[in-house]
Image: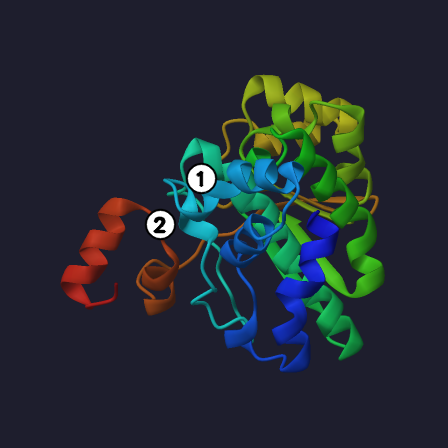
Amino acid sequence: MIDRCLPIVYQKYFEHPVPENMPVLGDLYQCLREQKEVQAQRIATALEIYVNGSLKVFNHRTNVELENRIICFDIKDLGKQLKKLGMLIVQDQVWNRVTVNRAARKSTRYYIDEFHLLLKEEQTAAYSVEIWKRFRKWGGIPTGITQNIKDLLSSREIENIFENSDFIYMLNQAAGDRQILAKQLNISPHQLSYVTNSGEGEGLIFYGSTIIPFKDKFDRSLRLYALMTTKPSEMEKSRETTGVV
């Protein structure tokens, strides 16, 4: 049923491929409702909550300018029922951009904050592993950011992300995480001391087989620091003194 409806739904877009002609989920729903088969009606009924119900947030064309050089996808406000769907939509959009940029001989940098959240769901975890394996061949440069190492190394499949990462930037680690990382990355006890009760901006950099301790102190009086800090107290002070939001 879906295979029959999709060409109909996309016909207008294929004839005139402009953003305003891009179909939304509601168009597929309407096409299914117009089919005579009982199976089509069942599928349409299953989609109804995502089209007209409380989960219809994705039944719209995007209001994001997807041609911008920098795009931020924020899914923190999505409810539990939509979180997985939101993550899959973002990953699909990123892969589409990588494909387009590769044809234009451009690299694509992809930064994922709270990366462990993608690894909790089987489908998004599998997609993430696939991204890590394929991105470099397509000019993609993925970077995962997480404070939860246990989730990152929760399965052999997810461990492949570590094995396919040439660069790791490691800050202070909890005792349990240190032991996991020491075994996974062959970190010596002396090297491990650099991520044991270490201060801000201190840790280890892994580049290939090379491990380098670092200590990075950023001048807090600089305007650049005010722009980058995420500490609530410093952000409030910055707004009061410089007007930076």
What number is the disc on residue 83? none
What number is the disc on residue 49? 1
Dividing the picture into quarters, in which one does residue 191 lie? top right
Give how far across and how far down residue 33 sits, in percent: 55, 49
Image quarter hosting the C terminus? bottom left
Q: Secondary structure at mark 1?
A: helix
Task: Identify the residue at image location x=68%, y=35%.
Answer: 123
> On screen, 81 above or below 30?
above
Q: Amino acid at mark 1?
A: Ile
Q: Is residue 187 left or right of residue 193?
A: right
Q: Is residue 77 left or right of residue 62?
A: left
Q: Is residue 27 visible?
A: yes
Give how far across and how far down residue 48 sits, in percent: 47, 42
Q: Is residue 171 visible?
A: no
Q: Is residue 222 left or right of residue 146?
A: left
Give how far across and how far down residue 183 sits, in percent: 77, 22
Q: How many marks on residues?
A: 2
Give the residue number, with chain letter if any, for mark 2.
230
Dividing the picture into quarters, in which one does residue 170 lie? top right
Q: Amino acid at mark 2?
A: Thr
Task: Identify the residue at image location x=26%, y=53%.
Answer: 235
Task: Identify the residue at image location x=54%, y=36%.
Answer: 46
Callout 1 touching callout 2 (CB < 8 Å): no
Query: From the viewer's perspective, is the residue at label 1 or at label 2 nearer?
Result: 1
In depth, the one of 217 and 178 nearer the eye is: 178
In depth, the one of 196 and 170 nearer the eye is: 170
